[in-house]
Amino acid sequence: MSALAVGCLGLVALFVLMFLQVPIGISMIIVGVVGYAVQTGWGPALTLFTSEPSALLASVDLATVPLFLLMGTFATAAGYSTDVYNAAAAMLGHRRGGLAYATVGGSAVFGAVCGSSTATAATFAKAALPEMLKRGYAPSFSTGTIAAGGTLKSLIPPSIVMILYCIVAKTFIFDMFVAAVVPALLAIAINLMTITLIVRMRPSVAPVLDPMPWAERWEALRRALPFVLLMLTVFVGLYSGVFTVNEAASVAAVMSLVFALVQRRLSWNSLWLGLRETAGATAMIYIIIMGAT
């Protein structure tokens, strides 16, 4: 059987396994090992099955994944997403579409320390959606804004998607982070411009709200200060060359934990749940990378 025929049958088998609800990583491992065995024999295939996972588990670059996930877990458990959103809403909420601007801006800022687009969107669905609906924003406009804001995370360093791509493609993670800055800023600007057009064409989807007193605005900004400090530490340390990518992930994870403990926002239950979620997501990502390899 030719390599092309094996590849085509492997793709069909992969989709069949996924249709049968076999986890994606496991499906890729099964198809990869069997396809390799058909062409070279079971001995080399099983040798590859042991050597490749060992190499991935020992990869220093891949260690950034659980660290950035852990940082995002601590930041979410500490309620920093709510602080960021409230600060943005306090400054922009009195403008038409202000809460939508705050949602996109808050998602972008929170995405700078949360490695997952899904986690960013889910977090802001809890923080922003009730506030937008309570203030008369259209449900479709509110949910669409949150979904669009969540997708920004894929372009905003540190992005788990970028890290995984760099590991598979064998490119430098830091170079990818630098290259992503301009596209990320463009994506944020386009989202904000889209909101502006929608609220001007359909003012009913985003009513104008009364401005908050300056005392409440300053209090909202003060609450978001630790998160801003965390974000600046990651970005300045990373892009100035003080930290490597791995060091930046480690420092950020520790800082987010310390801030959460100092502010007494992290309970034993939320810490345990956060560690479980991080471990589960990390295991899933590792298995997918093993299967892809």
Image: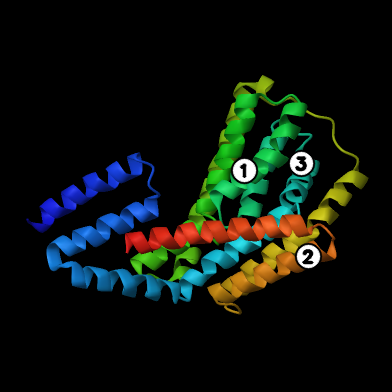
Residue 207 at x, y percent in the picture? 74, 25
Answer with left or right where residue 11 lies relative to residue 40. right
Residue type pointed to by label 3: Ala
Residue 41: image x %, image y %? 15, 67
| Mark 3, secondary structure of its residue | helix
Tell me which corner region of the image, top left, top right, bottom left or bottom right, holds residue 126: top right
Q: Say what amino acid the circle numbered 2 marks.
A: Phe
Q: Quadrant of the N terminus?
A: bottom left
| Image vertical order of residue 154 relative to residue 130, above or below | below
Q: Is residue 276 left or right of residue 90?
A: left
Q: Which three-letter amino acid code belongs to the residue tagged 1?
A: Ala
Q: Are marks 2 and 1 in contact (CB under 8 Å)?
A: no
With respect to residue 75, does 14 lie above or below? above
**Mark 1, other Cα within 10 Å: few <14 / some 14–19 / many ≥20:** some
Q: Residue at x 62, y 58 (%)?
A: 276
Q: Which of the pair 280/70 is nearer the observer?
A: 280
- Quadrant location, the C terminus: bottom left
**x, y (%) of residue 163?**
46, 64
- For the residue pair 6 and 194, the one nearer the viewer reads as 6
Q: Quadrant of residue 38?
A: bottom left
| Disc 2: which residue | 259
Regarding mark 2 in the picture, which secondary structure is present there? helix
3D distance between C-alphas at marks 2 and 1: 22 Å
Q: Which residue is mark 1?
A: 122
- Mark closest to the chain's N terminus, 2 or 1: 1
Spatial distance from mark 3 to mark 2, Cα to Cα?
23 Å
Is residue 285 visible to us here? Answer: yes
Residue 219 shows which numbered tag? none
Indicate which disc, 3 or 1, sits on the residue closer to the N terminus: 3
Residue drawn at (73%, 45%) of the image:
85
Q: Which numbered dot is residue 89?
A: 3
